[in-house]
Image: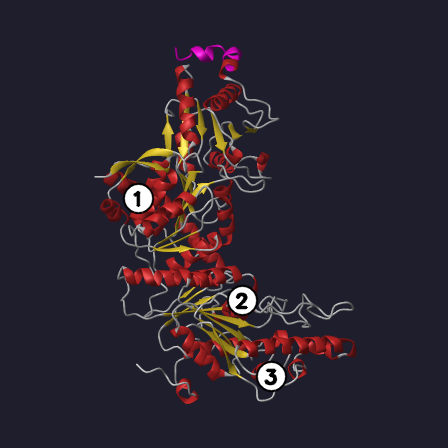
Amino acid sequence: MGRWMALEGTEAVAYAMKQIAPDVVAAYPITPQTGIVQTFAQFVADGEVSTEFLQVESEHSALSACVGAAAAGARAMTATSSQGLALMWEILYIAAAMRLPVVMPVVNRALSAPINIHCDHSDSMGARDAGWIQIYSENAQEAYDNTLQAVRIAEHPQVRLPVMVMMDGFITSHAVERVWIEEDDAVRAFVGTYQPACTLLNLERPLTFGALDFYDYYFEHKRHQVEAMRRAKEAILEVAEDFARRFGRRYGLFETYRLEDAEVALVVLSSTAGTARVAVDNLRRLGWRVGLLKPRVYRPFPDHELIEALRHVRAIGVMDRAIAFGAMENGGPLWLDMLAAAYRHGLHIPIANYVFGLGGRDITPSEIEGIFTDLMQIAERGMITRPVTYVGVRGEAPLPTPAEWALWLPEATIAGD
Amino acid sequence: MAATPLNLKVLSEKRTPLSGGHRLCAGCAEAIIVKQVLLAIDDPVVVINGTGCLEVSTTIFPYTAWRVPWIHVAFENTAAVAAGVEAAYRALIRRRAIPEDRRVVFVAFAGDGGTYDIGLQALSGALERGHKFLYVCLDNEGYMNTGIQRSSATPRGAWTTTTPVGAVMPGKPQWRKDLTGIIAAHRIPYVAQAAPSHWKDLMSKVRKAVAADGPAFLNVLADCNRGWRHDPALTLEVTRMAVETCYWPLFEVENGVWRLSYRPRRKLPITEYLKLQGRFAHLFQPEYQNLVAEIQAEVDRRWEELLRRCGEHV
């Protein structure tokens, strides 16, 4: 049997790492990830885990050491945030292209400048096309569960790609939550032993890793990466199924909340989904048919599945905690992907973008109720006047309130009574 | 098992870990050095290679010139990758995934750009952490793979494409960085400077390096005839002259003890080295006489400093 523990998000992930007992962990401290490395360091110091723990001199070296270790046949992990992830950029692509199953918890934090230590998704969103699988966690329990599953997904013979597991900086990383920690042996049985297809330390069969490709082979190798990413979706579900069978907690590509009969839906990642659930409940009490969809897997992007889950609604709001500067309407990356997916799968309804929470700015249930009110108006009109709204920022025209919507269209408030 | 004796007859019968057919330039010192380094090691080796001439010329997919396990990841992280590989080796032995008695020597090769400049941080970190590996800097005194640009290893007065000789610039204005000294300051068990012209000295140093209990570093002068502008047949002659002029002294620092491993019978003037190379051709015009004198003075100063450190009479 496992047990309940009161843990911060970073501690929950460090706990997962201890139970995974990677052969090599190479990491560098950065706020708000630091809790992971220092908790793990204590496990090493106490002899609770026998990992080779490299306290490297930079994140660039952290991931480089993981690449070397993984190529040598070791199970390797690191963890980072923000600037650390930015410093790793070069090696992110290499880890993915060398098909090395490195697992990396990322504690989401804003990117400089201005320097800021608080949560937004600019860091991991910037790495969305680097070839890593990306899984977002709403709370400490999910961060723990996703970290365990990430090992299996990364090492899945049909995949062999690195995986990032995200949690929100401070909101999740530094909040103490009640987390169910599984039995060590049960985790060990679940993650199994890394079985590399080929390793640098196989002296009987010397191999060359990281050769030079020209125009005659590079494209094929990139094409192989596409295939791996395509197969990842199935592997993620397969691993989730086994996880549910062993531990009882069920995960999919995304999670929905009161979406079945919803007229409008909100799509949002990570901890904000918890806040959005409160807003959904508040508005449901007024009789509003609103629902929520929280993507878990962002890369590979489950475009088809997402659109099928949303096909019945009249308007969609996508909340982004990052800006894709210079992209269409200077919106957020999740919105851009949702627009493309809707177009691709023939869903022609208004999809509005709400950029929020940059640099850790708080988002409240009432602000999300404002977003839902805006969406109700959009659904009613069948069109969008403001494609991207920057929520809660000075100088931005405010969103309507539910009370205003009631004045504008009184029957909306009584529809459910 | 007794070590293979360092004599040419025996060594010539050993299978070289780097096979022929690679695409390094004719006369390139790197292939010579790599063979000297790896032939000196009897245990199985795993090679970690930073981006550069050696890497691009030996592993053009689907071919490889390497008969030993080899990995390349990027330019500035050779030491960090080596650290990861070495850590994996220790972890896999501990969980008995590989036999405990399997000895493996980890050898990293990187150029001066990847060592003096962009990779210095990763190298310093790996040395401080004490990973057991041999790092060999193939010092050709510039970014030769990108087409002869200056690095912090490029000597003063040398022409490169980014320190061209012009009306107001006499080639590179700065002195080269003393990397071997910087590495020695890390107080790792073994640090040495070597040259392929003195092969037995180089190979003996490799033997000591891999026997050391911890990180070892070898800085090897790697003549590049394309960048240094001379006949490809002169590689070892130019290298020998670097040693004989005391421009590139051969020494080692073993557990903090400095020792000169070769002292030229008669220290030749630096011009004997400079005049062999097109990159210094402009220095022989009258207006650069002073610069040549400054270069000679700096060589003398560094040589005397080294003699004192090694306890030799000056």
Check residue B143 in the rendering and tell me which mark sits there, or answer none: none
Asked whether A339 falls inside the magenta stretch, the response is no
* Mark positioned earlier in the residue sequence (3 or 2): 2
Residue, disc 1: A239
What amino acid is at disc 1? Val
Closer to the eye: label 1 or 2? 2
What amino acid is at disc 3? Met
What amino acid is at disc 2? Ile
Res B26 seen here: no
- Quadrant for the C terminus of chain A, please: top left
Closer to the eye: label 3 or 1? 3
Residue, disc 2: B182
Q: Is residue A71 above or below residue A355?
A: below
Q: How is the image coloured?
A: secondary structure
The stretch of residues the image draws in magenta is A405-417
* Displayed quadrant of residue A399: top right
Q: Is residue A316 above or below residue A245?
A: above
Q: Secondary structure at mark 2?
A: helix
Q: Which secondary structure is most common in the magenta stretch? A: helix
Asked whether A412 falls inside the magenta stretch, the response is yes
Tag 3–tag 2 contact (CB < 8 Å): no
